[in-house]
Amino acid sequence: MTQQRQLIANPPPWPGGARCAVAMTFDLDADSILHLAHREEATNLVTTMSMLQYGPRVAMPRILKLFAEFNIKQTFFIPSWVIERYPDAAAAALADGHEIGHHGYLHEHPNELTLEQERYWFQRALDVLEDFTGTRTRGFRAPAYRFSRNTLDLLLEAGLSYDASLFGDDIPYRLSNGSASLIELPSHYAMDDWAHYMVGRDFGYMMPIKAPAHAMDVFRSEFDAAWRHGGLWISVWHPFLSGRLARFEAIGELLDYMHGKGDVWFATLAEITAHIEALIAAGDWTPRTDELPQYPGPLPELAEGP
């Protein structure tokens, strides 16, 4: 029998001796992304608008019902404009004990903004979010993963504890700006339903749509690997995509599979961060550290030559 290869050199110990940590995060973007992409024409793109509004209006209740069935608390990243536009959906998640993380104001892309613009939208979103939840915000996911060279500084200035935007490992690691640091909770594109399901003419996405079984093969394979090697499994779902009937049935079946396998710690990203911080403080585990920005500017080599 072939001996199993250990692919993660330094897996953190998970609570209760769990083999892996699982977070099924949802990005409730609703129609913010349509207004951002088509400022003048958005209100005339009625079919796409209806597709996106399916998220807060139809999908969110069934998502919350499923989480209640499994008695798990998870993390929702919601642009603050969406909280203002669809307060009932956000309030229902909050009432059920789920975490709401910072996801920009109108799903603006940080790495397309000046520092002043990014700071303005970041703070505007934070003010709305904390006023709505009544609690200090712990974490952030950059809209569309568009983390900028300035984003880490803004997160640290605001006192946030974690980011969930980057793809740099299979387990938590630390991001530092040289003066302070926070915990990075990474994922990757294969764990995002957008890559499997998104088709939208008004966004320029016209890809073949995967059957739920095909998408779940990917998510389940990634989970099995995380379970074998002690990893962190963070999936990224969008209610307007994965809240659809056949796809959401498949999510329920995936949760059944995970529970049947056992030794899985389901947690919010804030809970995972608190666990990692406690391990570090006790000297029981040490993550690697990435310092940002990694480069002061464009590579000088690119300016060299004839």
Image: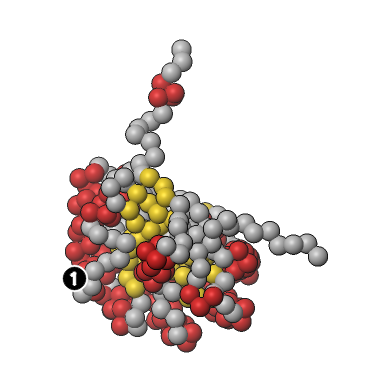
Q: Is residue 36 visible?
A: no
Where does residue 209 sit, x and y in percent of width and height? 57, 61
Q: Which residue has dot 1 on it?
A: 131
| Residue drawn at the location 18% of the way across and 71% of the way down | 131
Of all residues, the one furthest to the front in this rendering is 283
**At which x and y percent is residue 40?**
27, 52
Left or right of 291? Residue 19 is: right
Q: Residue 287, can we see it? A: yes
**Quadrant in the picture for residue 160:** bottom left
* Camera-nearest residue between 68 and 200: 68
Mark 1 Cα-neighbour bin, 10 Å: few <14, some 14–19, many ≥20: few
**Which residue sits furthest bottom?**
69
Indicate whether 29 appears above or below 299: below
Q: Is residue 176 above or below residue 19?
A: above
> What residue sits 27% from the left and 54% below the top?
156
Residue at screen point 57% across, 77% down: 263
Q: Amino acid at mark 1?
A: Asp
Residue located at (33% from left, 53% from top): 181
Residue 102, horizontal then vertical, whole percent: 30, 63
Q: Count the marks: how many? A: 1
Which coloring applies here? secondary structure
